[in-house]
Image (spheres, rainbow, N blue to C red):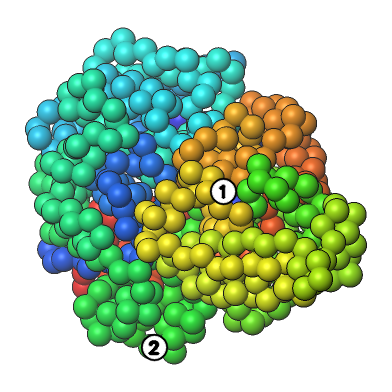
Amino acid sequence: MRKFKKVFKLAAAMGLSVLIGAGTALAAEQPKRGGTLVLGTYQAPRHLNGAVQSGMATALPSTQLFASLLRFDDQWNPQPYLAESWEWSDDRKTLTVHLRQDALFHDGEPVTSEDVAFSIMANKENHPFKAMFDVVENIETPDPHTAVFKLSQPHPALLIALSPALSPILPKHIYDDGQDLKSHPRNSKDVVGSGPFKLKEFVPGKEVVLERFDKFFLKDKPYLDRIVLQINQDQTTLLIGLQRGDLQMLPFMGDPTQLRMASADKNIEMLDKGYEGIGALAWLALNTERKPFDDARVRQAIAYSLDKNFIIKALTMGFAKPSNGPIISSSPYATQDVHKYALDLDKAKQLLDEAGYKPDSNGIRFKMSIDMLPGTGAISKSLAEYARAQLKKIGVAADLRTSADFPSWTKRIAGHDFDMTTDIVWNWGDPVIGVHRTYLTSNIRPIVWTNTQSYSNPKVDELLEKAGVETDLEKRKALYAEFQKIVTNDAPLIYVAEVPYHTLVTQKVGNPPVSIWGPLSPLDDVYLK
């Protein structure tokens, strides 16, 4: 058996450490206690339970309410959280986790291995990232503070999967009552976790109010008395609130208009560090179960109609980097040997002709709609408007379709009720967690951020299955390289940009979150100066 310090070496061997991005170095200061941090967000959570829902909207409050087994530093090293230590078996099919003995839920009940077993298996059954815990056969609980993960095969992404935003530990005594976990009333009301903050109030679409949990298991943490998440779809309004001092932190700001405004304000600090684990890609997703998008030639034609250089320079003002494939460029598994689509309108027209979609008397080949992800102007609305104009040049008439709010958009996309949509999807640290879900045939489900494109390629399924258990870094890279080449040729998605997320904070904020998970980490170290 190998103790967890050796796990750090394994993480490095698997190439995780090379993903570290540039960021602002922060000087250590003596933290102060007390105060309310007002944090702005442009996505509204439907509920607060990250065990059954992915994405920023849910994870921002969930990571404060619920603790997880591990957390990660800014060097991709796993750190103790609810787990004091852990060890792997030599065949890497058993992970033994030793829990700390002083952790309590917000209602005073102790956190035990039974809660861990219940939570992980519930996550396996309900979370949209199906590949995250698929190979966990069961979790043994030989005593209240030991949980033994039994795997059907090696799982190189397991430690990353035990991060706060991915696998919160739920109180079994509350959730194991026979009700559907996805719609459980305690996901939104009287929420009980073991994280640094407890729920005071949740007003859907408006705000989430969190208060300090005085019996949090980390001594003298958290420093803040309260966190208020204020929800507003208008990012400019949020930025003005930050400039006025009504807010102190704005995470996940990637819109170039707001980034340019913020860069001109000497009272705002722009942190690009803290999103390495997230790995956000902006793309256009096509519904391959609908005609004419079931034909790869049509999808390729749409890709050839777009000028990615224009998108980066004009629409993102140069803040973003171009994306050419399903794995973010900072990952050790990314490859440049992919099918790239430079602007070529003649090629696009030729492909549409070959697919049988020739212009009618009005020059129209077919009509379609483009949905827009709410709350992301430049990489959504502007991109959709640009795509519509470009598609017109190749004889495709596209209408723009808006959603009233973020939940409305997720419902539509989860229901596969779209032709093409703008979207931002995360790599989530390891391809098993954040990449496989988009391409596996087995993950075609009515849940947002699964394979809502209905894309299916048996060879891709085979490659991802092999890569998901391969512990040799070079062999794993080769599998993912072949996968990327196939997928970019099939073109179920049109890759556009790597999202330039920043956390904007005022000068009052001390210890802003800069681990690999950034704002999706527990904010127990954050304080107000």
Residue 219 bears which disc, if any?
A: none
With 46 as the anchor, is 302 left or right in this view?
A: right
Q: Is residue 228 above or below residue 15?
A: below
Q: Is residue 276 above or below residue 316?
A: above
> What residue did someone put label 1 on?
427
Dividing the picture into quadrants, the one containing residue 210 is bottom left
At 82% from the left edge and 57% from the top edge, which residue is drawn? 357
Viewer-nearest residue: 107 or 156: 107
- Which of pointers 2 and 1 lies earlier in the amino acid sequence? 2
Viewer-nearest residue: 395 or 191: 395
What's the CA distance linking mark 2 and mark 1? 31 Å
Residue 265 bears which disc, if any?
A: 2
Task: State the SS at label 2.
Answer: loop
At 59% from the left edge and 62% from the top edge, which residue is drawn? 369
Q: Is residue 495 above or below residue 133?
A: below
- Percent position of residue 367, x then y: 67, 62
| Neighbourhood count class around disc 2 (C-alpha, 10 Å): few under 14, some 14–19, many 20 upward | few
- Percent position of residue 448, x then y: 48, 45
The quarter in which the C terminus is drawn is bottom left
Q: Is residue 54 above or below residue 356?
A: above
Looking at numbered disc 2 in the image, what kind of residue is underneath it?
Answer: Asp
| Residue 156 in view, yes or no | yes
With 143 as the anchor, is 312 left or right in this view?
A: right
- Percent position of residue 147, x then y: 35, 19
Dividing the picture into quadrants, the one containing residue 86 is top left
At 35% from the left edge and 69% from the top edge, which residue is drawn? 233
Q: Residue furthest front?
A: 361
Viewer-nearest residue: 394 or 331: 394
